[in-house]
Image (cartoon, rainbow, N blue to C red):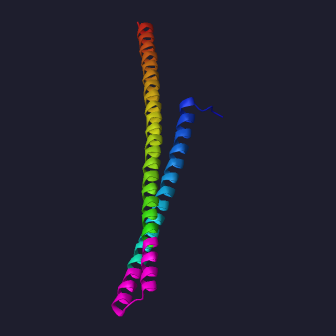
Amino acid sequence: MAQKSPISTLIELAEKATDEAAKHLGRMIRAHEETENKLNLLIQYRDDYAQRFQDGAAKGLSAAQYGNFMSFIGKLDGAIEGQRQVVADAEHKIQLAKNMWQGSEKKRLSYNTLHHRAQSVQLAKEAKQDQKQTDESAARSYFYKR
């Protein structure tokens, strides 16, 4: 069994790191989508509740009912602001995960470039050796024909 070169090992490790970073980025994107969905649900619920308040106010509300509506709307507004912060945090986590993935991908590409350069150097070296052997063989053949 042929032994792997150190650069091949580095490439494998970089590929694994890149795959893990991509999976992590995907999880962060899904988490962000979930937080946005929750925010949208809260906003929709607040709008529906505000409409119920408007309908109730048109019919006439007692002071206690008015206080209850306003208190609950205030709580909903607080929940919405809290969820907006959660969405912003999720966006920040996406950016961090994207940066991590880009760094891993850059490292992987760098290792591949080094590997290809090393292969090119090795091929050039082998071609030079083959040419030298061909030249020597041709020179010997010419010398012995004389």
2 displayed left or right of 50: right
Q: Where does the N terminus fall, quadrant-wise? A: top right
Q: Residue at horizontal 47%, vertical 69%?
A: 38
Q: Is residue 96 above or below residue 117?
A: below
Magenta residues, dominant SS class: helix
Q: Position of residue 34 (x, y in %)?
A: 48, 65
Q: Is 57 included in the stretch rendered in magenta?
A: yes
Q: Position of residue 60 (x, y in %)?
A: 37, 91
Q: Is residue 20 above or below residue 143?
A: below
Q: Position of residue 113 (x, y in %)?
A: 43, 33
Q: Residue at horizontal 51%, vertical 57%?
A: 27
Q: Is 73 included in the stretch rendered in magenta?
A: yes
Give the magenta part as a residue range.
Answer: 48-75
Taking depth in this image into account, of 81 and 112 the one nearest to the observer is 81
Q: Where does the C terminus fall, quadrant-wise? A: top left
Q: Position of residue 41 (x, y in %)?
A: 44, 74
Taking depth in this image into account, of 14 and 127 the one nearest to the observer is 14
Q: Quadrant of residue 116?
A: top left
Taking depth in this image into account, of 18 and 89 the one nearest to the observer is 89
Q: Residue furthest left?
A: 58
Q: Is residue 51 above or below residue 141?
A: below
Q: Quadrant of residue 99?
A: top left
Q: Residue furthest right?
A: 1
Q: Residue at horizontal 47%, vertical 23%?
A: 126
Q: Quadrant of residue 120?
A: top left
